[in-house]
Image: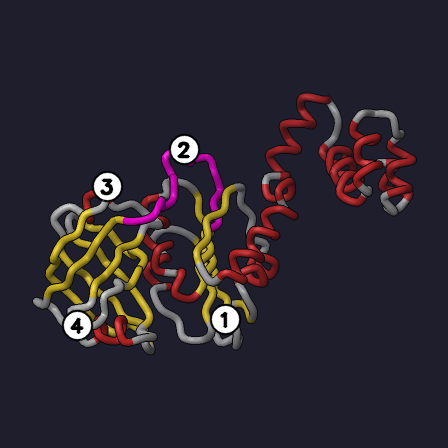
Amino acid sequence: MAYREKVTIVRADEIATDIYEMCFSTKNIAKEAKPGQFVSVYSNDGSRLLPRPISICGIEGDTLRIVYRAVGKGTQEFATMHAGQTLEVQGPLGNGYDISKVSKERKAILFGGGIGIPPMLELAKQLDCEKSIVLGYRDELFLNDEFEAYGKVYLATEDGSAGTKGNVLDAVKACGIEGDILFACGPTPMLRAIKQYAKENETKISSTEMRKMISTILGVSGTKIAQLESINRNLVDEAKEQFKDGSMPVSVANEMAGLPERDCRR
């Protein structure tokens, strides 16, 4: 349920160039909020009718924390405000992240890019499992120190000034980061790349534990399981069906997949 309230600002600061945080006390919004949701913040200028959607960065009792970039007249107005002033806010809005079914045994990778980093902080705080946190910036860092209390933090910067030079997936590859569940927030190109990464690495992400289980059940080595996975990844779709139903011998499938002969003998 969403509420529209007049809230009182308790803290407002610039934490990086054009990046601002604001904390405000609420009656009901903070109590109902969960990681990944956002609020709509209304301007006190009557000429600006549309609110600005801003992700929730932190939830502490009846207080919400938002972190935003000042890029237009609305957010630039918010950037000039200070403790004691009031605003109209509506929320919580959006579905947020469903973490109720994430067990402690899972290994999560949290991706945050640019102004998509703030909402990952409350998620990192509430998610009760092993976490690798990958944060991507253009150059100037913000909030990264706060994540360190909740998991291993990896950085990526476009200019290489901190962490891995490149994007968040470059950091994943460079640092050998693995996980079996992904959470992400950031610019659309980053999210598309992560979606493709998850698709391509669906087996690889959980390959270690999965191979252990399969090899135990079937009584074959983990190396053999890895070989079958490799063959399946490299076959064309029609051949995959024949390979899966057992009508194509492993040696033939291996040759069609273009893998070295030694892989077939393992």
Identify the residue shown where x is 58% and y is 57%: 193
Identify the residue shown where x is 37% and y is 40%: 128
Tell which circle, 4 or 3, labels the residue nearer the N-terminal end.
3
Q: Which mark is residue 101?
A: 2
Q: Specify the amino acid type for callout 1.
A: Thr
Q: CA distance from mark 4 to mark 1?
A: 37 Å
Tell which circle, 1 or 3, labels the residue nearer the N-terminal end.
3
93 on left or right of 156: left
Indicate whether residue 95 is drawn in magenta. yes
Q: Specify the amino acid type for callout 2.
A: Lys
- The image shows residue 172 at horizontal and vertical percentages of 56, 57
Q: Identify residue for label 3.
A: 1
Answer yes or no: do the residues labelled 4 and 2 have beta carbons within 8 Å? Answer: no
- The image shows residue 229 at horizontal and vertical percentages of 74, 38
Q: Which is in the foreground here, disc 3 or disc 2? A: 3
The part of the chain drawn in magenta is 93-109
Answer yes or no: do the residues labelled 4 and 1 have beta carbons within 8 Å? Answer: no
Label 1 residue SS: strand
Label 2 residue SS: loop
Q: Identify residue for label 4.
A: 45
Q: CA distance from mark 3 to mark 2?
A: 22 Å
- The image shows residue 50 at horizontal and vertical percentages of 26, 64
Identify the residue shown where x is 52% and y is 56%: 191
Q: CA distance from mark 4 to mark 3?
A: 27 Å
- The image shows residue 148 at horizontal and vertical percentages of 37, 57
172 on left or right of 262: left
Q: How many marks?
A: 4
Q: Identify residue for label 1.
A: 157
Label 3 residue SS: loop
212 on left or right of 42: right
